[in-house]
Image (cartoon, helix red, strand yellow):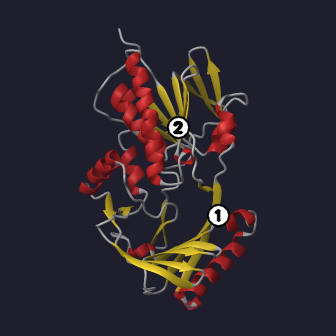
Amino acid sequence: MREKIHLAVIGSGISGLTVAREIAMWLGENAVTVFEKADRPGGRMASKVINGADFDYGAQFFTVKTASLQALIDEMRAQRVVDTWCGRFIEFDHKTVCSERNWDDNYPHYVGTPNMAAIPEWLAKPLKIHYETPVTKIVKKTKGWQLHSNKTTLGIFDWLVIAIPPEQARALLPPSHQFQTTLSSIKMQPCFTLRAALSEDIDFGFIAALVRNHDISWISKNSSKCNRTAEPSVIVHSTNKWAQFHLNDDLEQIKHHLLECLQGITRIEQESIKSSDVKRWLFANAPRYSGSNHLIDYQSAIAVCGDALVHGRIEAAYKSAQHLVSDLTSEFEEKGVFAHRPMAGNSKKI
């Protein structure tokens, strides 16, 4: 008789969702449980509608070089969950245009539709996910890992995959665990995001801009993406360096400065900005990491994955998860726990 394995995944960003989907295909839909502290999946693939205007205020787009990810994107595109973002792209050196080109289907820049959050929502559909359930403590038991959410026991699982930022993963792991050294060497970087709704549709001369040698690094006309609402909207990201220096500043002061930066580059009038707010991201980006793209401890049956172990990109998150899945499925197959059944799950709170 084959041994049964129950696996828990902490975090429902792209890495966590990828691991959960792939392992559920091997072990069966009831063998994998995802725990997510937010009320939705996606992590930094975040979107929100504010007063009728669409804002993708985390990841802006992604490109694909990995064949397996391309196949997944093609499937999502066929179901109208993904499309390409086409138009004029500009690079600024401070306030001076230094490069410009057109984004087109020759080198696709993908976005979710009707927003970036549609992608993790699609990935999450077949999975068993407990939302609004932060895992606050993990305890190694003789037969697995016991998970706790504050005073609630979530169960004991044979394998545990942690797919959250390194700082948060370290806080859960035992202080002496072998992953601590690697995770402590990875410092994720913060960012502030300005969300601005406009009173009229303004042509900036670009759909998106990379900004160098400035306090901001990115401007995009979010409403130029396909299938967005008619309300014009703009996203501005600060640089990681500026955000780190001003991390604890008042958000109104942050907003005022980012608006000044936006106006200084685009020449947009203050009267054209209908509303605006700022989101603080503590773990926005990860510098390029040259070590292993995932961590696995076979003896303790625990693993860590995520873009922070590669680079702060959506494809990096996917690749980290895929390499971990390859190791895990090899381990499960060796132990005779292979199972292949259609996925079917539900997403709920506990």
Q: Position of residue 110 (x, y in %)?
A: 36, 62
Disc 2 residue type?
Answer: His
Distance Cα–Cα, label 1 vs label 2: 24 Å
Depth check: 29 or 94 in front?
A: 94
Q: Position of residue 188 (x, y in %)?
A: 64, 52
In the displayed structure image, the side of residue 297 where residue 174 appears, left or right? right
At horizontal 69% and vertical 73% (from top left) the residue drawn is 254
Depth check: 297 or 137 in front?
A: 297
Q: Is residue 15 above or below residue 250?
A: above
Would you say residue 14 is visible in this rendering? no
Q: Secondary structure at mark 2?
A: strand
Disc 1 residue type?
Answer: Asn
Q: Is residue 326 above or below residue 77?
A: above
Q: Quadrant of residue 240?
A: bottom right
In the displayed structure image, the side of residue 126 where residue 9 appears, left or right? right
| Crowding at mark 1 (Cα within 10 Å: few <14, some 14-19, many 20+) | many
At horizontal 54% and vertical 54% (from top left) the residue drawn is 312
Q: Is residue 104 above or below residue 175?
A: below
Q: Which residue is mark 2?
A: 294
Which numbered dot is residue 240?
Answer: 1
Q: Residue furthest left?
A: 78
**Which sits earlier in the primary sequence, circle 1 or circle 2?**
1
At horizontal 43% and vertical 51% (from top left) the residue drawn is 315
Depth check: 29 or 331 in front?
A: 331
At horizontal 39% and vertical 75% (from top left) the residue drawn is 224
Depth check: 128 or 262 in front?
A: 262
Which numbered dot is residue 190?
Answer: none
